[in-house]
């Protein structure tokens, strides 16, 4: 796939929304204001129209709520950047994340990159990307996920709101990476905690399990992630027993 030089190393940001987060304008402005961001695609699943003055922002208005995973698929089809950033409409973050992740993606060591759970607590150390934890999507990883556009694997149509992050991670030839040293904040569910979405999530759980379970253990890097996780846990326990 030929990539125009104006898109090389730059992000297409995909933001699905039902307009239930008060942070949506700030999220869009943060993304559009960064020089590494080529475009921001807001997939509007709500009936009320949206508009931004920035030439970087394009709203993909939907006639009905197509739900989050199909919105990601739509955004990926429309995107022009070399990299994709799939961003929740309720996550606040330091825009330096684009620099850190862009550098990591250019090196080709990781597949999908998202924030480590420590990024939602007290942040310390140099901003960087390292091998993700074994429990990659247990907290926060899916609110800001980045990958090469050519590596995006469309999420099965029967998975509308559940398991999209796991699908994208497992579809990669490279292991997931975790962002450290960059601050993230999120309400974790301004949309997903609604009764409508909770009901749909319960209905789709079995379908997601049916699709995702056979993928477990099929990637070479899963063994690496588990091995490194074991070393990290051993080091943590050792530090706890060392005299202070």
Image (cartoon, rainbow, N blue to C red):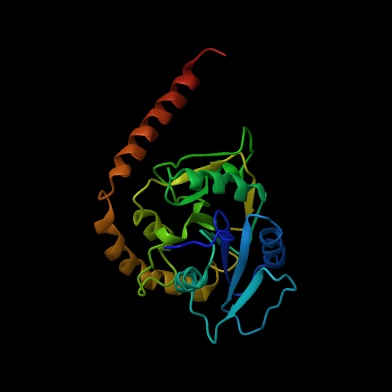
* 15 relative to 50, above or below: above
Is any part of residue 19 visible from this angle?
no
Which quarter shows the N terminus? bottom left
Of the pair 84 and 198, the residue shown nearer to us: 84
Instruction: Please count the marks in the image.
Output: 0
Query: What residue lies at 71% left-to-right and 77% top-to-bottom?
Result: 51
Which quarter shows the C terminus? top right
Query: What residue lies at 59% left-to-right and 70% top-to-bottom?
Result: 41
**Residue 25 at x, y = what percent?**
71, 67
**Residue 193 at x, y = what percent?**
54, 67
Of the pair 222 and 154, the residue shown nearer to us: 154
* 244 relative to 68, above or below: above
Query: What residue lies at 36% left-to-right and 53% top-to-bottom?
Result: 172
* 14 relative to 227, above or below: below
Of the pair 222 and 21, the residue shown nearer to us: 222
Residue 120 placement, left or right of 155: right
**Residue 216 at x, y = what percent?**
28, 52
């Amino acid at each position: 796939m030929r990539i125009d030089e104006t898109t090389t190393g730059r992000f297409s940001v995909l933001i699905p929304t039902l307009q239930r987060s008060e942070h949506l304008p700030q999220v869009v402005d943060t993304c559009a204001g960064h020089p590494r961001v080529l475009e921001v695609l807001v997939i509007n699943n709500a009936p009320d129209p949206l508009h931004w003055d920035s030439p970087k922002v394009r709203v993909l208005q939907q006639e009905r709520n197509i739900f989050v995973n199909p919105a990601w698929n739509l955004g990926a089809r429309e995107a022009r950047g070399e990299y994709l950033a799939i961003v929740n409409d309720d996550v606040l973050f330091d825009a330096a994340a684009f620099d850190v992740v862009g550098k990591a993606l250019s090196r080709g060591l990781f597949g999908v990159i998202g924030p480590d759970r420590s990024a939602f607590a007290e942040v310390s150390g140099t901003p960087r990307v390292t091998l993700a934890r074994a429990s990659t999507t247990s907290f926060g990883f899916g609110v800001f996920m980045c990958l090469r556009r050519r590596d995006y694997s469309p999420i099965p149509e029967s998975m509308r709101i559940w398991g999209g992050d796991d699908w994208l991670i497992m579809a990669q030839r490279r292991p997931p990476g975790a962002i450290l040293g960059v601050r993230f904040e999120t309400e974790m569910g301004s949309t997903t905690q609604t009764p409508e979405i909770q009901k749909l999530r319960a209905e789709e759980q079995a379908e997601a399990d049916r699709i995702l379970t056979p993928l477990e253990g099929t990637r070479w890097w899963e063994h690496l992630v588990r091995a490194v996780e074991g070393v990290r846990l051993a080091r943590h326990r050792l530090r706890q027993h060392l005299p202070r």
